[in-house]
Structure formats: C-alpha cells, structure tokens
Amino acid sequence: MASPQKKRGGVGGVSNGAVKSPWSKALSAGAQWGDKDEFLDVIYWIRQIIGLVLGVVWGVVPLKGIVAILLFCVINAGLLYLYFSSFQKVDEEEYGGTWELTKEGFMTSFSLFLVVWAIFYTALHYE
C-alpha cells in the first residue's frame, strides 16, 4: 500500500530522508525548489495573506480612494518581488520571468483585499 504522502525528489525536496513542507522551505532563505508548481503555490498563498492583512489595515486606518488601491498594488508587488528575488534568490527565467512571478495570484489577492477592505471600512466607519 502506498503512503498517503509521497516523497518528492529533487534538490531540496528531501532532507535526511524526510520531506520538507512547502511552508518550511518558504520560510528558509535560499531554499531549493524542485517543483515549480510548489513555489508558485507558495507565492499565490503569500499574496493572499498580504491581501487579507492589507484589507484589514486599510479598513481600520481608514484609507480610501485611488491612493489606497495604488498603495496596495505597490506594497503587494514589491513585497513579493523582494521575497522571490532577495530572500529566495530564485532564477526568475525558470518561472517565465519576473513579470510572471509578480502577477501570480495578483487578481485573486486584489479581489480578497477589496472585499475585506470594504467589510472592515463599512463596519467601523459607516455613519
């Protein structure tokens, strides 16, 4: 009977016979990503967390208008760019270039941000 958790091969996928989780690799600087989709999944979910957190912050502060939206875009894209270029030091060309990594999951993150921002802003500042 096969184990429910498959061991992934590749550099950095197996450490001392144990499989490192994507999140433990995501939090270690310069981790080796054997599976491209695994790294893209981490980028996607980090972006969702950023969208959620910024939506709450923008709703509480309260920020509004085009300035808040542009600030979200700059912070979201900037943090992810710093993450994959400086912290993880991945070869962007291996993933289709910087633009592909920068836009991975951006629209869903933006949607989540807008919903959370509207809910918190309305709940706290609606007269």
Image (spheres, rainbow, N blue to C red):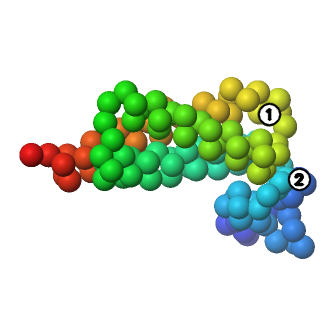
For badge 1, the amino acid type reads Glu
For badge 2, the amino acid type reads Gly
In the displayed structure, would residue 63 be above or below residue 8? above
Q: Residue at x 40, y 31 (%)?
A: 67
In the displayed structure, would residue 122 be above or below residue 95? below
* Dot 2 crowding, Cα within 10 Å, few <14, some 14–19, many 20+: few
- 118 or 125: nearer the eye? 125
In the displayed structure, would residue 86 be above or below residue 106? below
- Are the residues flagged by discs 1 and 2 in contact, CB closer than 8 Å? no
Query: Can you identify the residue that label 2 sits on?
Result: 10
Task: Using the rendered image of the protein, determine whether residue 79 is visible from the camera's viewpoint.
Answer: yes
Task: Using the rendered image of the protein, determine whether residue 35 is visible from the camera's viewpoint.
Answer: no
Q: Is residue 127 left or right of residue 117?
A: left
Q: Position of residue 11 (x, y in %)?
A: 90, 54
Q: Position of residue 25 (x, y in %)?
A: 75, 60
| Among the two numbered marks 1 and 2 on one chain, the one whose residue lies closer to the N terminus | 2
* Dot 1 crowding, Cα within 10 Å, few <14, some 14–19, many 20+: some
Secondary-structure class at tag 2: loop
Residue 65 image-quadrant placement: top left
Q: Nearer the viewer, mark 1 or mark 2?
A: 1
Q: Position of residue 33 (x, y in %)?
A: 81, 50
Q: Is residue 114 left or right of residue 1?
A: left
Q: Is residue 92 left or right of residue 23?
A: right
Query: Can you identify the residue that label 1 sits on?
Result: 92
Q: Residue at x 82, y 42 (%)?
A: 90
